[in-house]
């Protein structure tokens, strides 16, 4: 006779996201209230510090004025996608956690872009089986999407985020001041995630993005801050309230446009930024949805028009690369990442979507060829 013991239990999490301006200002006590008397290991994106060298002095003065116990001078590590290309950043953070005796009642403070937060967060989630992490995302992409999530990871075996962990951060601090250091490309990048989540979740937000497209494209910080904040809210609410924060199922609405984007990043050797790749991936999903009869042609055109208004291209040559490691292998890798069953979320209307479990190659490449034709027509007009 078989003998077994099966026990159901649940763990409650609180996902805390704070929006502020000037987190290291002398009168801003947000960080101090979060860490209280605990030890804090500060880890900063070296690229951020290069762009904003005064940050080190601001952080030191703030820590002194607020009596925050930093265990060392800020640890400056590789940022950008290079932070995730191997385990180097993870190993350095783990080494610092061990050397500084950071325990599960201490904090790692990570300040930087989304890829940097992914790598540092992975280290924090594995040290002592998880130490407290405070994320301070500094780009439009990380403030509006990646930085407010519960995923961490690095790229291994040539695959995006193959090695990683789910871990709810102790807090996320979104400081709009960091957006002032970004160039035009950096400011634009995160807007594609706003378009994606608006299309997926909220018609009013999509319409607001259309109305403010000119201001957003020009780099208007007030407009960009509004778009990033609403994007962050919608992403976080989906994660916390949609019933599958750790992605145990196969449906991943927030990955709309990402199966192609992740592959395009690899195929272009990261010539495309993540936001640029997602713009192409989202355009591909939208045209595919229209080809399948899931979305009206007029709405598909609105989405493509908005992406173009914001300054995104919706095609690159690698989209139709057909030798060996092509776009289609990205779909198979995405299927594997989901656990073997393909589940793509395609838009059907503003705030509406549908899960599909099969997709013919000819449909995808018909959509890709249409995006190529649009691109060539646009280029002809520009010239």
Image (cartoon, rainbow, N blue to C red):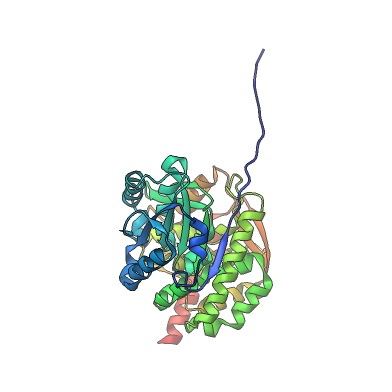
Rendering coords of residue 272 (x, y %): 39, 67
Name which residue lies at 59% across and 44% down: 248
Q: Residue furthest top?
A: 1
Rendering coords of residue 352 (x, y %): 69, 64
Does any portion of residue 174 appear in the rendered image?
yes
Asked if 233 appears above or below 249 in the picture, the reply is below
Asked if 207 appears above or below 101 in the picture, the reply is below
Name which residue lies at 38% across and 64% down: 64
Name the one closer to the observer, 192 or 326: 192
Does any portion of residue 365 appear in the rendered image?
no
Asked if 99 appears above or below 209 in the picture, the reply is above
User: Horizontal placement of 380 versus 361: left or right?
Assistant: left
Rendering coords of residue 61 (x, y %): 37, 68
The quadrant of the rendering that contains the N terminus is: top right
So how many labels did they put on this image?
0
Residue 110 image-quadrant placement: bottom left
Residue 196 image-quadrant placement: bottom right
Name which residue lies at 33% across and 66% down: 47
The quadrant of the rendering that contains the C terminus is: bottom left
Rendering coords of residue 164 (x, y %): 45, 47
């Amino acid at each position: 006779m078989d003998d077994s013991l099966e026990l159901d239990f649940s763990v409650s999490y609180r996902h805390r996201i704070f929006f502020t301006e000037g987190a290291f200002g002398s009168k801003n006590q947000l960080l101090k209230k979060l860490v209280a008397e605990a030890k804090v290991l500060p880890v900063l994106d070296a690229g951020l510090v290069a762009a904003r060298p005064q940050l080190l002095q601001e952080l030191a003065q703030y820590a002194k004025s607020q009596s925050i116990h930093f265990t060392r001078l800020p640890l400056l590590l590789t940022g950008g996608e290079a932070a995730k290309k191997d385990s180097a950043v993870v190993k350095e953070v783990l080494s610092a956690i061990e050397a500084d005796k950071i325990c599960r009642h201490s904090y790692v403070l990570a300040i930087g872009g989304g890829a940097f937060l992914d790598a540092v967060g992975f280290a924090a989630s594995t040290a002592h089986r998880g130490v407290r992490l405070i994320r301070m995302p500094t780009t439009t992409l990380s403030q509006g999407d990646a930085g407010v999530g519960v995923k961490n990871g690095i790229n291994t075996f040539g695959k995006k985020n193959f090695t990683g962990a789910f871990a709810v951060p102790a807090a996320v601090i979104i400081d709009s001041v960091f957006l002032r250091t970004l160039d035009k490309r950096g400011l634009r990048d995160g807007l594609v995630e706003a378009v994606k989540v608006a299309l997926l979740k909220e018609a009013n937000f999509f319409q607001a993005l259309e109305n403010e497209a000119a201001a957003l494209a020009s780099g208007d910080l007030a407009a960009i801050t509004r778009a990033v904040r609403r994007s962050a809210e919608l992403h976080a609410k989906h994660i916390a309230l949609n019933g599958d924060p750790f992605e145990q199922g196969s449906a991943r609405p927030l990955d709309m446009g990402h199966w192609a984007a992740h592959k395009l990043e690899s195929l272009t050797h990261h010539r495309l930024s993540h936001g640029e790749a997602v713009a192409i991936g989202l355009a591909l999903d939208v045209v595919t949805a229209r080809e399948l009869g899931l979305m009206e042609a007029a709405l598909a055109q609105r989405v493509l028009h908005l992406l173009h208004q914001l300054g995104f291209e919706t095609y690159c040559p690698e989209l139709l690369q057909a030798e060996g490691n092509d776009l289609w292998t990205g779909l198979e890798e995405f299927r594997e990442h989901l656990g073997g069953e393909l589940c793509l979320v395609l838009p059907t209307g503003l705030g509406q979507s549908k899960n599909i479990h099969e997709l013919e190659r000819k449909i995808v490449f018909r959509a890709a060829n249409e995006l190529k034709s649009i691109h060539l027509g646009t280029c002809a007009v520009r010239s």
